[in-house]
Image (cartoon, rainbow, N blue to C red):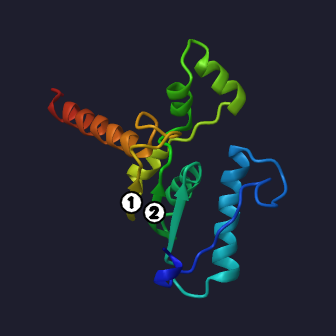
């Protein structure tokens, strides 16, 4: 899709995937995204000012929304495809029971990534795609439904604040 439209693409694998070394974890992945952006800006990109897009699919959407939120001065476009609104939602959706949240927090080392908030607050051009038949990322934990919920919550909260007597 990108190459057919003559868009330059920079891709990478998570640590320990596709021949990459290291151990993947959320904190390293955020750092890797920052390093890749720095590499593109310092070593590859030749124009001023930089105009970049960021694409993330599935788990990569969490890192794409984070990068776009942290660097709106460079990221002009955000495309997130079949991703999560928040990683903890998938554990709640897939595994039922009173220990779900505790187990998730233990194994993820308390990782918090609110992609829905990063996507919602990103001011550039943005698109979210979701497959309603996705067997891994259902509508409960999908980015699009979490963004919609966040937008509604903010709208109603703002309305309540504007109507409250001072």
In the image, farthest residue toward the right: 21
* Cβ–Cβ under 8 Å for marks 2 and 1: yes
Mark 2 or mark 1, earlier in chain:
2
Q: Which residue is mark 2?
A: 78
Task: Tell me the element at label 2.
Answer: strand
Q: Residue at x 30, y 38 (%)?
A: 154
- Give the answer, above or below, for where 41 lies relative to 136: below
Q: Which residue is mark 1?
A: 127
User: Left or right of 51: which side holds 9?
Assistant: right
Residue 156 visible, this angle: yes
Could one spot residue 123 in this view of the protein?
A: no
Residue 48 position within the rendered picture, expressed as x and y whole percent measured from the top left: 53, 85
Measuring 56% from the left and 41% from the top, which residue is drawn there? 113
Quadrant containing the C terminus is top left
Q: Secondary structure at mark 1?
A: strand
Residue 17 sits above or below residue 10 on the image: above
How far apart, in angstroms, are the residues tagged by discs 2 and 1?
6 Å
User: Residue 128's quadrant in the figure?
Assistant: bottom left
* Nearer to me, 155 or 126: 126
- Expressed as whole percent of the image width and height from the top left, the position of residue 18 reads 77, 60
Q: Nearer the viewer, residue 20 or 166?
A: 20
**Left or right: 76 with respect to 46?**
left
Q: Quadrant of residue 107?
A: top right
Residue 84 in the image, given as x and y percentages of width and height: 50, 43
Crowd class of label 1 (few under 14; some 14 to 19; many from 20; radius 10 Å): few
Residue 67 spot, x, y in % from top left: 56, 58
Most extreme residue toward the bottom is 46
């Amino acid at each position: 899709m990108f190459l057919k439209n003559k868009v330059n693409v920079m891709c990478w694998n998570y640590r320990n995937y596709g021949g990459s070394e290291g151990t993947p974890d959320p904190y390293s992945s955020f750092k890797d995204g920052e390093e890749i952006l720095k590499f593109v800006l310092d070593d590859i990109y030749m124009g001023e000012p930089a105009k970049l897009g960021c694409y993330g699919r599935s788990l990569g959407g969490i890192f794409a929304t984070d990068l776009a939120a942290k660097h709106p001065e460079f990221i002009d476009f955000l495309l997130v495809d079949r991703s999560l609104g928040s990683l903890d939602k998938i554990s709640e959706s897939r595994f039922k029971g009173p220990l779900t949240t505790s187990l998730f927090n233990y194994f993820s080392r308390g990782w918090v990534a609110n992609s829905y908030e990063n996507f919602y607050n990103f001011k550039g051009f943005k698109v979210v795609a979701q497959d309603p038949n996705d067997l891994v990322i259902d509508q409960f934990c999908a980015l699009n439904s979490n963004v919609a919920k966040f937008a509604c919550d903010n709208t109603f909260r703002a309305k309540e604040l504007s109507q409250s007597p001072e």
